[in-house]
Image: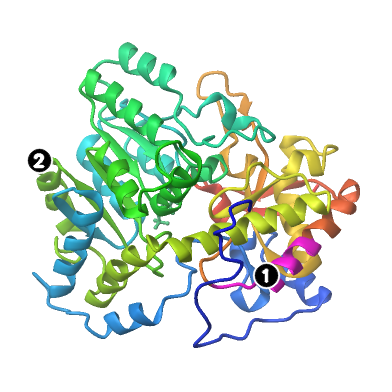
Amino acid sequence: MSDPNWPAFEPFKAKVIEKIPITTPSQRRAAAERAKYNLFKLLAREVTIDLLTDSGTGALSDMQWSMMMRGDESYAGAESFCRLEETVRRITGMRHVIPTHQGRAAENLLFSALLKPGDIVPNNTHFDTTEANVSAKGGIPLNLPCGKAHDLDDLSPFKGDMDLDKLDQVLTENKGKVPVVFTTVTNNSAGGQPVSMANLKATAEICKRHGVPFYLDCARYAENAWFIKHREKGYAKKSLEQIAHDMFGCADGALMSAKKDAYVNIGGFLATRDRKVKDRVAEIMVVVEGFVTYGGMAGRDMEAVAQGLNEGLDEDIITARIAQVARLGDRLTELGVPILKPAGGHAIYLDARRMAPHLPQSQFPGQALTVEIYLEGGVRAVEIGSVMFAHKDAESGEMVYPELELIRLAIPRRVYTDAHMEHVAQTVAAVNNRADGVRGMKFIYAPPRLKHFLAHFDWV
Ligand SMILES: *Cc1c(COP(=O)(O)O)cnc(C)c1O
């Protein structure tokens, strides 16, 4: 927060408000028990401050609501599609634009078109649905984060970067088995950390040398562009739109969950420079997603995405957002809570291992603390650790645990005030102060994929 040009306040005001639920400790205990200690199973009316995700939970602007009135609901060739297509083409420079109802639909379509069983997909770090969609097609998702990504205290500016040497090695050793390389901007599962332009360019160069297409998973491309502007040499004077254009310029294609940096409740797209990929995707999508000019979206949804994409590159709005997230991180640090540093673009990640060192990974420290944070102050966060990523090794049958046990506090866009954030900080600090008394958790039920959404838990 050293830059004197950062505004100390949001560059907007409330026009509509929504009352939030205030609950008692006994109501929260009953709710958590009923939900089998899986906070995805809580009802919204049981949650006071909802930091489960920043996906689809942002507030729309008056301009987005106005544009939605212009939604053209024609089955084919709607005006709303044309506006979305024009906007995506302008920002990405990619010619073929395929609307989808959300990010994972774009993942499913692209991997259906590109993957054969046994194929490897490298990524700086797969988001959970991306990993699941690669696996569901028989592919092997491979995470190649840079060495600093797992050091929670390393203050490097671009901890979201891809490990370039490993990528080169993987492509050299697996010729013909890697149909696409991905970089996720910002790197959601590795702490919302940004990826540098230098790393994107180098990744593109390696992919080109090996003749493998390079795609961006660009849910938070605007936040990533902001970090490049403020942290990477040579970009301070460029507009976010220019930087975004340069980022996309490295890639052959991109898929986006518009529920993040496009400020919509639902929506997404796939964009590509490759006509053949577009044609293959079009054949698949008419079966599972919808006609090529609406995907799974209504015309009004496409209007909201198009307008939201433009607002996502508004410097004042995004500066205020990143500053709010950073302030929460500073406040938690002040209160003695261990967090992943530096603060990510869309979320603060708590270090569950350091909060509760007495709990082994097999007892899900992140999940146990996430439940306690809800019980303490009605704040809903999400575990990003062993519940999400621990798995049996296919050969040895041993459990493999992730390096990090994190709890994500994702901040919805344009929704909460700093007073809400202070309640969050106080709640988390209270749990941190009594964390040595927190019991571990175990699965009562767990589905094979994306366990965290549906699992049931109990205390050990
Ligand atoms: C949210 C997200 C997705 C999946 O998008 P949905 O809209 O939730 O289906 C994919 N990748 C990243 C990086 C995301 O943040």
Q: Which of marks 1 and 2 is nearer the N terminus?
A: 2
Image mark for residue 334: none
Residue in the foreground of this view, choosing between 220 and 406 = 220
Res. 183 image quadrant: top left
Residue 198 appears left or right of 397: left
Residue in the foreground of this view, choosing between 11 and 116 = 11
Residue type, numbered disc 1: Asp
Residue 185 appears left or right of 206: right
Whether residue 458 can be seen here: no
**Secondary structure character of the magenta stretch overall:** helix
Q: In this view, does 146 lie above or below 425?
A: above
Q: Report whether the residue tagged 2 is closer than 8 Å to ligand 1.
A: no
Query: Mark 2, residues whose alpha carbon is within 10 Å: few (<14), some, or many (≥20)?
Result: few
Residue wearing tag 1: 418
Q: In this view, does 303 lie above or below 258?
A: below
Indicate the secondary structure of the residue bearing disc 2: helix
Residue 340 appears left or right of 65: right
Residue in the foreground of this view, choosing between 373 and 28 = 373
Q: Position of residue 329 (x, y in %)?
A: 69, 53
Residue wearing tag 2: 276
Indicate the secondary structure of the residue bearing disc 1: helix
Examine the structure image and report whether residue 421 is included in the region drawn in magenta. yes
Q: Where is residue 442 in the image (x, y as percent from the top left)?
A: 72, 46
Magenta-drawn segment: 415-427
Whether residue 157 can be seen here: yes
Query: Mark 1, residues whose alpha carbon is within 10 Å: few (<14), some, or many (≥20)?
Result: few
